[in-house]
Amino acid sequence: MANNDSGSGSGGGERRQGSGPDTLTPAPGGTALLIVDMINDMSFDGADALRDAATEAAGRILALRETADALGLPVIYVNDNDDQWHSERSRIVARAAERAGGSRPMVERLAPRDDDYFVIKPQFSGFYATNLPVLLPKLGVSRLVLTGVAADICVLFTAADAHMRDYGLWVPRDAVASNSPERTGWALEIMDGSMGADVRPTTERSLEDWVAAG
């Protein structure tokens, strides 16, 4: 299993919030922003088709991250280990930036900050063999804003696992991407129809509205 670094410290320590050393302030509206696999060198087969869509989604994700900061929401990166089994957060970010080529500006724009959580996943779902199922309850999270790539693979699998754990889901259609608009639409249709996810874009629903409804 990959090493799961859910904070800025070593040994998988969580980002601390609140006054005490072990205190985590409950997330406003029970909401966390999840950013899936956007720290990505896009060096795999089919990446050219994904890169442009992911770069466009990155702008929406960055805007959501800025709003999340203003609202005091936890920002959680859930990122593939890219078969680097001895890796950790800083090495994954550095490797992605070094190898990213045309997607390097996206990686640099969306690189996690010191106060963001970073969960390393070994498979498609952010919940499988990671500490995400432990971290979210500690943050008082019951509702997720799910963004990233690929909409029809890792975002979809993460959404399915979140749904089975009774998390509320908003998957903004303009903040996810896959190799084609058709595959993105297919995945969003499943998340909407089978998981009860809200898939309205950020132009039709704001993060402030989602938090207020929590």
Image: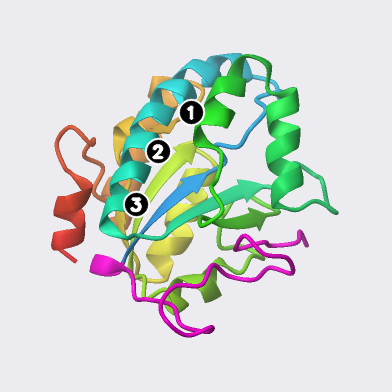
Query: Considering only vertical position in the picture, is 111 above or below 2?
Result: above
Q: Residue at x 42, y 73 (%)?
A: 139
The amino acid at mark 3 is: Asp
Q: Residue at x 42, y 67 (%)?
A: 164
Lower sequence index among marks 2 and 1:
1
The amino acid at mark 2 is: Ala
Q: Can you see residue 46?
A: yes
Q: Which residue is labeled 1 in the image?
A: 178
Quadrant (top left, top right, bottom left, bottom right) of the N terminus: bottom right
Residue 108 lies within the magenta run? no
- Closer to the camera, 202 or 104? 104
Mark 1: secondary structure: loop
Mark 3: secondary structure: helix
Residue 121 position by quadrant = bottom right
- Closer to the camera, 157 or 67? 67
Residue 7 lies within the magenta run? yes
Give the label, 3 or 2, closer to the camera.
3
In the picture, the disc for residue 75 is none
In the picture, the disc for residue 187 is 2
Q: How far across and down, in percent of the image, does residue 85 sit?
A: 83, 52
Q: Residue at x 54, y 15 (%)?
A: 49
Query: Considering only vertical position in the picture, is 40 above or below 31?
Result: above
Q: How far across and down, in percent of the image, does residue 41 sit?
A: 67, 28
Q: Residue at x 66, y 55 (%)?
A: 120
Lower sequence index among marks 1 and 3:
3
